[in-house]
Amino acid sequence: MKPISLYLVSILFSSCAFSHYTQPLYKDMLSWFKTPTDIAPWQLQQSGQQWILRATTMQDGGGHVFFNPLNQRCIVSVPHKFYDMGTLPIGQFIYDTLCQVMVSNSHQRYVKSPDTYPMDFSKRPYNIHNAALIAYQTHNINAKVFQIHGFSNKKRRTKQGKTADVIVSQGKTSNLTGQQLTSCLSQLGLTTFLYGTSIKELGGTKNIVHKLGLQPHSFIHIELSKPTRTRLRQESSLLKKFTTCLSRII
């Protein structure tokens, strides 16, 4: 690609990322992580050291934000808790035992949206989920974002996809962090592949989070097969070891 073309691409990407940083919800969340307060129409709740913003409407896609400053500096994202069965209790455990922040959807991703954007957080550009990711990483530049998804082996086309327990992705490319996580999960007896390296197919190749301007390779998309989600929910020791693998790369 010619230098002028690369320049135009970088300008376009920067403009796209910058647009997210100027949205009102981003500014609200930037302040919220310093001093949790009401952000209408979300409802503020406190439970011990934990602060919660709960959606009371479908405005801007709804969504919940959970924040416990006593935990470590990372985020767990559960964007499809109704559709990807089992991802919420898995994400909840990771939040309870490891990460300071959890974000989740409050409405099914296929319900009719009140505006022109889809309710699906992996496709919706403006929502409290994305605002929280950007704002939190602004305060904690090295924070990792673990997004938990489900997938069906039957819908995979390749041999690897049909046998996978876990598929890890950091986007179009990966770095040592992705390799370390893949290796750690494999050592637990989970058949784990790294997208772009050991497997070429993934369910979330167009995830909007990749366009938010987060730190390179800090967004880690983790797809779990249905049997793996069941095992993680039923085998507490395996879920603890799974979470330990995440803790080793933050």
Image (cartoon, rainbow, N blue to C red):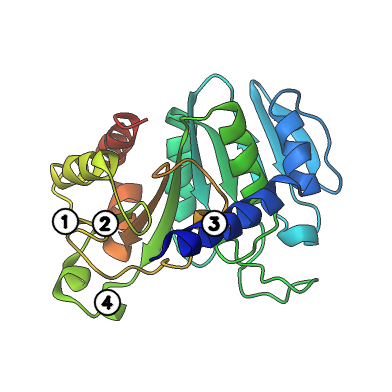
Q: Residue 15 in the image: x percent, y percent?
A: 65, 55
What residue lies at 57% left-to-right and 51% top-to-bottom? Answer: 212
Q: Earlier in the sequence, mark 1 or mark 4?
A: 4
Q: Amino acid at mark 1?
A: Thr
Residue at figure coordinates x 43%, y 29% from the top left: 98
**Which numbered disc covers residue 191?**
1
Q: Which mark is residue 86?
A: none
Closer to viewer: mark 2 or mark 3: 3
N-terminal-most mark, 2 or 3: 2
Q: How far is disc 4 from disc 2 in space, using C-alphas?
A: 13 Å
Horizontal relation, residue 30 to residue 142: left or right: right
Residue that label 3 marks: 211
Q: Is residue 139 above or below residue 127?
A: above
Callout 2: 10 Å neighbours few (<14), some, many (20+)? many
Mark 2 and mark 1 lie on one chain; the one further toward the N terminus is 2
Q: CA distance from mark 4 to mark 3?
A: 25 Å
Report the Cα–Cα distance between label 2 and label 3. Answer: 24 Å
The label nearer to you, 4 versus 3, is 3
Q: Residues within 10 Å of mark 4 (few under 14, many from 20)?
A: some
Q: CA distance from mark 1 to mark 3?
A: 29 Å
Task: In this rendered view, identify the residue nearer to me: 95 or 119.
Answer: 119
The quarter of the displayed image where residue 242 is located = top left
Q: Are marks 2 and 1 in contact (CB under 8 Å)?
A: yes
The alpha-carbon separation of the residues under discs 1 and 4 comes to 15 Å
Whether residues under marks 1 and 4 lie with C-beta atoms below 8 angstroms apart, the answer is: no
Q: Is residue 121 above or below residue 21?
A: below
Q: Which residue is mark 4?
A: 156
Quarter of the image with the N terminus is bottom left
Q: Residue at x 56, y 57 (%)?
A: 13
Callout 4 amino acid: Arg
How many angstroms separate mark 2 from mark 1 (CA)? 6 Å
Name the N-terminal-most of marks 1 and 3: 1
